[in-house]
Amino acid sequence: MSSYFSERTVEYSIVPPLVDYLTGRFGNAVPMFFWRSREGNSCSAKRHADAIVRVLAVFARRPKESRREGELFGKLNGVLHEFAESAVPVGIPCFVGFPFAETLFDLGRSPTFWFPIPPDRDGDFRFSVTVRGEDGDAVGLDGRLSQQSASSK
């Protein structure tokens, strides 16, 4: 399965709508890539000492080609499940953002599928998303995340 852009490019397209949603729901949302020597340093700790925060871990997944129009594939790497195994028990929800973008130019105007990362899985999981209609009405995420070896497909 080949892809046509990187996870970093996906991040640029999924973060703004996520921040808008979270701001509308909670009043404030700050996208950040936590860097211990910056956001985690003593200066930051002093400046934000009175702040109450909740953390949400979000991982961008890039779409991979399908042989059928209106269907895309994605993959959750085993390391994401390992991360979720450590994060979820301490109250950090872990989600994936998967844009239904059949080309680079679809980013930002195509639907993004959001789903939690299951912490109790081993190995890589592949999934498919199907969209129907010209307006991009979602048929849905298959949600079953059938386990496949990394070498298959």
Image (cartoon, rainbow, N blue to C red):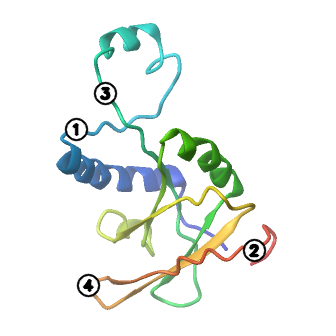
Amino acid at dot 3:
Ile
Residue 153 occupies quadrant: bottom right
Tell me what residue is drawn at x 56 percent, y 44 percent: 89
Tell me what residue is drawn at x 53 percent, y 21 percent: 36
Residue 68 occupies quadrant: bottom right
Relative to residue 129, is residue 37 depicted above or below? above
Discs 1, 4 touching: Cβ within 8 Å = no
Where residue 95 appears, as percent x and y from the top left, is 48, 55
Tell me what residue is drawn at x 22 percent, y 44 percent: 26
Residue assigned mark 2: 148
Amino acid at dot 2:
Gln
Q: Nearer the viewer, mark 3 or mark 2?
A: 3
Front one among 98 and 94: 94
CA gap between label 1 and label 2 equals: 39 Å
Front one among 141 and 87: 87
Amino acid at dot 1:
Asn
Disc 2 residue crowd, few under 14, some 14–19, many 20+, Cα 10 Å = some
Where residue 19 appears, as percent x and y from the top left, is 28, 47
Q: Earlier in the sequence, mark 1 or mark 4?
A: 1
Q: Earlier in the sequence, mark 3 or mark 4?
A: 3
Residue assigned mark 1: 28
Relative to residue 52, is residue 106 depicted above or below? below
Q: Nearer the viewer, mark 1 or mark 3?
A: 3
Amino acid at dot 4:
Asp
Mark carried by residue 88: none
Where residue 12 appears, as percent x and y from the top left, is 39, 50
Residue assigned mark 4: 135
**Horizontal placement of 65 versus 34: left or right?**
right
